[in-house]
Image: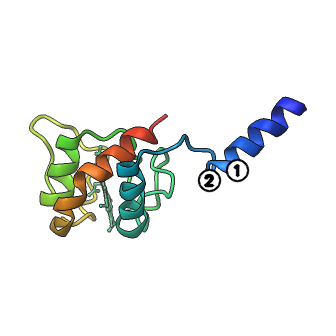
Amino acid sequence: MKRWLSTAMLALACGGGGPELSESAQRGRAVYIANCAACHAADPNLDGALGPAVAGSSLELLEARVLHAEYPPGYTPKRTSGQMVALPHLAGDLDALHAYLAEVAR
Ligand code: HEC
């Protein structure tokens, strides 16, 4: 019981159970919430309403998918609805997004 309580408090202190994020990842989290979470789950480890889980996505995949609505050569997409359009204005945020999706992956 005691252990459960301290674990719960630690989870609360970290804002929802995630590990501490680097500065870059915190910026990436804000970008993700603002631009991605409408379709992808608020927790990138889970499938969202439209988009699949994206935690742990490689920079190569993010660049292809987010900037060009494409996939790296040989990559098999998790879904093929074609509902995600390119978001090229996020080019300057890709590194932060990548850091966030890497650090939050479990
Ligand atoms: C309009 C809804 C929508 C938005 C907004 C959106 N996505 Fe998606 N995303 C999807 C859908 C749907 C797919 C699955 C492919 C398809 O069906 O087109 C997808 C696929 C992906 C994939 C490929 C997953 C895989 O491994 O196959 C990545 C990576 C991704 N999205 C990242 C993002 C990021 C990062 C953002 C924000 C910058 C974002 N998406 C914004 C709907 C969205």
Q: Are marks 2 and 1 in contact (CB under 8 Å)?
A: yes
Q: Nearer the viewer, residue 78 or 34?
A: 34
Residue with the mark numbered 1: 12
Q: Quadrant of residue 38?
A: bottom left
Tally of marks: 2
**Image coords of residue 83 (percent x, y):** 27, 65
Looking at the image, in which quadrant does ligand 1 appear?
bottom left
- Dot 1: element: helix
Callout 1 environment at 10 Å: few (<14), some (14 to 19), or many (20+)? few
Name the kind of residue labelled 1 in the image. Answer: Leu
Crowd tier of the residue under label 2, counting other residues whose Cα lies within 10 Å: few below 14, some 14–19, many 20 or above: few
- Tell me if residue 54 can be seen: no
Residue beneath label 2, please? 15
Helix, strand or loop for disc 2? loop
Q: Residue at x 50, y 58 (%)?
A: 42
Task: Name which residue lies at 41% across and 63% down.
Answer: 30
Q: Is residue 1 above or below residue 29?
A: above
Amino acid bearing label 2: Gly
Residue 57 % position (x, y): 30, 41
Q: Quadrant of the N terminus?
A: top right
